[in-house]
Image (cartoon, helix red, strand yellow):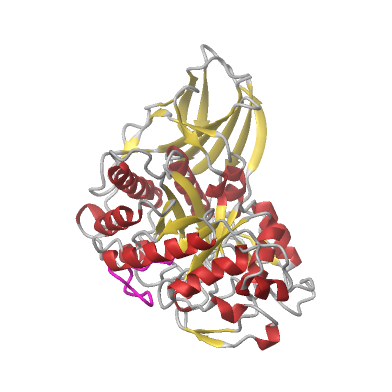
Amino acid sequence: MGRSLSLSVLFLLGLGSGAEGVLTGVASAQEAGERALIKIDLDRTIGEVDPLLFGNFAEHLGRMIYGGIYEEGSPLSDERGFRLDVLEAVKELGVSILRWPGGNFVSSYNWQDGIGPKDQRPVRAELAWHDIETNRFGTDEFLAYAEEIGAEPYIAVNLGLGTLDDARYWVEYTNEARPTYWAEKRRQNGRDEPWGVTYWGLGNEIDGWWQLGQRGPMEYSLFAREAAKAMRRVDPSIKLVASGSSNYGADWIEWNRTVLEELRDHIDYIGIHTYINNRADDFEQFMAWSQRIDHYIEITAGLINEVRSGRQGARPIYIAYDEWNVWYRAFEAQDLEEVYNFEDALAMGVFFNSFFRHADVVKMGNLAQMVNVIAPIRTNEEGYFLQPTFFPLVEFGKQRRNTSLDVFVNSPSYQVGNRGPALGYLDVSSTYDPESGTLFVNVLNRSESRDIETSVQSQSGDPATEIGVWELNHPNLKETHTFGDDERVRPVERTLEVDVRDGAFTYTFPAHSLTVLKLSMG
């Protein structure tokens, strides 16, 4: 996580230019009477919605760890220091993979400080976020927490100020079954069996000038390649995520191309980070960030295809969107405790619709972050509340392992600045669960004021006439939650009868809303 120039930061400061400039200048829509059309064909598949898309991120930053998921001495915590009330909320969130310990934090972090008896662990000056790190929450605590919530652990190693030995010894500590030095250290610390950590990140945002240990693309690639080799010598089964560019004000495409060319035989994913904003206070412009998200995915996917082309048996490489969220109001605040509103909740649909439409290549996602710090859950000493962004995260997570479908959409449209063609007001993705025969149609209406009547057409037979509807809507785009008052922005679920003729029915998507239609195709 990069405070200074991670993706959105350049846009927040207005430093983008040309096609990569700030989204401005929303043009007028097409005629108000125009209807929309959504066509769905179960044979037009994209790929599996990977369960790892519904991950999260826990960095040592603000109150994410201490006072968030972990609070020793609190009456709300267990003997391990885990906040039990927060634990239940996190379990409801359905986190599939949890990234830790950073973020910028990791580039000066010595993982050996965070193991062994807690009272003997050193207290360090924390260099990324100008804080104090007590090291009372370390590797074993993190892995126990991930195990408790049923999430895959994802550890980012220190390729900033760290060494190759630091990286390989960390894998040995967590994964080695034989009686080696670091495996015995783990056993002495109370864990006999290996933790079996599969997912490892090769550093964080190493292209950023804000990062300790910043490197150029070739310098990083050569160092990361040696780290990958050393780590896999310890455990050949691990999967590795390369640090893609997070500095979109520089030549991010060249960075990603170099990393992919040099690491193509060693990595399983390349990471992308994107934070979006509504600094212009323009709802329709805010919802248009999907164009930029699609662009970053498609350019990176093209680079992956380029480096794999013509190489028989080339290693599969996917995209890990391992930091993403809305982030701008609390940008300069030390604690980064963003207060999310209804329109931010709709932005969750912006990301997931894009991820689903690229399900063949986007195979991991990590919302940044989980508790307190730009998070869907906020705590104090007495309890917690759920921010409006919480609810779409849970709902989209129900589509994990479904098959994503290539959907035809024609809707009234609008133009945003110079960023590509006109953008349809209806932002749509669709997935299908062949086991239950359930078709999901996910629709974000990006119009601030227009309800859009839509013909939903199945090219694969008639759906049942009774459909399920999950809808998130509110008259006030700026509505927020707080402690003791988090019922204002909540989804509504209902069933309704529709008139299906020749596989089609009509549904009107309300202005500024996120809707999931559930159709039985049995």
258 horizontally vs 123: left or right: left
Q: Residue 205 placed where, x, y %?
A: 38, 66
Q: Nearer the viewer, residue 318 or 415?
A: 318
284 horizontally vs 119: left or right: left
The residue sitting at 40% across, 45% down in the picture is 315
Vertical position of residue 191 compared to residue 480: above or below: below
The answer to whether residue 69 shows anywhere in this view is: no
* Quarter of the rendering containing residue 243: bottom left
Q: The N terminus is located in which quarter? A: bottom left
Q: The C terminus is located in which quarter? A: top right
The residue sitting at 59% across, 70% down in the picture is 64
Secondary structure mainly formed by the magenta segment: loop
Q: Residue 304 placed where, x, y %?
A: 33, 46
Vertical position of residue 128 compared to residue 305: above or below: below
Q: Nearer the viewer, residue 233 or 210?
A: 233
Q: Residue 497 placed where, x, y %?
A: 64, 22
Residue that lies at the very extreme toward the top in this rendered image? 502
Q: Which residues are magenta?
A: 202-216
514 horizontally vs 496: left or right: left
